[in-house]
Image (tube, grey):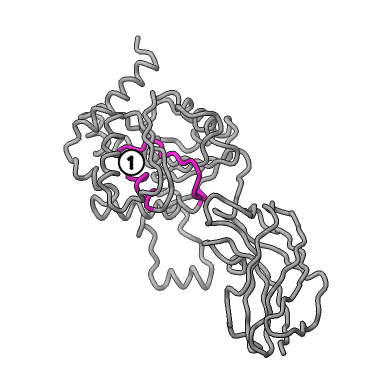
Amino acid sequence: MITKKDKLKQYIKAADFYYQNYEFTEFLSNKPFSHLPEVIRVFHCLSFLLPEMYLAEGQKIIDFGAGVCWLSRLLSRLGFSTISVDVSFTALQWGKSLYKKDGIANPEVNSHYVTYDGFTLPFKDASIDRIFCYDALHHVENLEDIAYELHRILKEGGIAGFFEPGLNHSDTAAAQYEMKKYGILEKDLDIFDIMRISRNLGFSFFFLPVSPPGSIKFNDKQLEEFFIYHASYPTAVLAENAKHSLLFFLIKGKPHYYSNAPHILTSRIEVLEPLEMYKVKPNEVIPVKVKITNTGDTTWLATNKYPKGIVQIGTHLLSSSNQIVNYDYYRMNLPSTVTPGQSFAQELAIPAPAKEGQYAIVIDLLSENICWFEYMGSPTCALKIFCS
């Protein structure tokens, strides 16, 4: 009698055989740029997947079921270190070779390649920040075992994002061909089965319905009905498409957002001893006491190994007619990291303009190399300055 473990070993052997004997090597080596339909499909799906992963430099990111590691290389180009994980040693060696040849992959980030036995992922508990699984879960026989492992290795607040074919995938000509020729596993994934397994483990689950590009189109009449008369969206078409393109996310515990990969960056800035007009001399230091409250859901980093995402208090200098004189006029570091709901008091030492005249100084916050808070809809605070 063939045991579950024996069956899994057969599929692992078949996966390595697939990469050792695949006849269209150029197709796999060039993935995801092998041909135009593939490019369209991949980047369409990534446009939904990436924004929900809240990636930041320094995170430990796994590319699960990486194959020849095309997604790992793509993430490397974006500045993220990755750990490519697969049951096939041949696939990972192929991916490692492609990374070395890739002149665009970022040489300053780390790339690691790890095989696993199909049951246990060789990582410590709560050691991984993010997990990508693109077009790989439908090759997994022991779904519950792997879901348990993903939950085990993710940190609290960690996110796993998936894109998979759904119903009737195994009946497609391509799937039938590869099962017959290479003996690999091609499964039909049931999103409700995945939801049940993930929730039993304690994951939060959410699903994004995705339609292939161009599958929902409006003529001029339909567009008018949709925008002006609020006619119903073609939900039946969307639902049918979503059954065959499963884009979903598993979150361990409550999501943790930081200013290097923010969700909501908003603040309340209060001047504690406001003046109707600050009358100063050119270049004189203007002491301004403020109370600042984190009104968003994102922790503001005061320091970080990487400069991106460090939050500072910043100001804009405007003329009396509200024209920008100096957009990045003055900055001050935060006294410490600020969590959502936390307030702190700070005395700013803002230099007066060098030239006489009437000005406005607008106080805001910024997350370095990401945005000023005003860009996210956060209110600012303005001071009137008369310099003479």
Q: Residue furthest right?
A: 273
Asked if residue 361 is positioned above or below residue 29 in the image, the reply reads below
Q: Is residue 1 left or right of residue 60?
A: left
- Which one is nearer the viewer's eye here, 379 or 171? 379
Magenta span includes 56:
yes
The quadrant where residue 374 appears: bottom right
Stretch in magenta: 52-77
- Which one is nearer the viewer's eye here, 27 or 192? 27
Asked whether the viewer can see residue 188, the reply is no
Q: Is residue 148 left or right of residue 90?
A: right
Where disc 1 sits, the SS reads loop
Residue 73 is situated, as x and y percent measured from the top left of the image, at: 34, 46
Dot 1 amino acid type: Cys
The N terminus, quarter of image: top left
Asked if residue 157 is positioned above or below residue 77 in the image, the reply reads above
Q: Please state the total of marks drawn on the protein image.
A: 1
The C terminus, quarter of image: bottom right
Residue 228 is situated, as x and y percent measured from the top left of the image, at: 52, 73
Magenta span includes 44:
no
What residue is shown at x 67% (from left), y 57% (from top)? 296
- Which one is nearer the viewer's eye here, 276 or 52? 276
Q: Is residue 22 left or right of residue 266?
A: left
Q: Name the residue carrying label 1.
A: 69
What residue is shown at x 53% (from left), y 57% (from top)? 308
Q: Is residue 7 left or right of residue 20?
A: right
The quadrant where residue 158 appears: top right
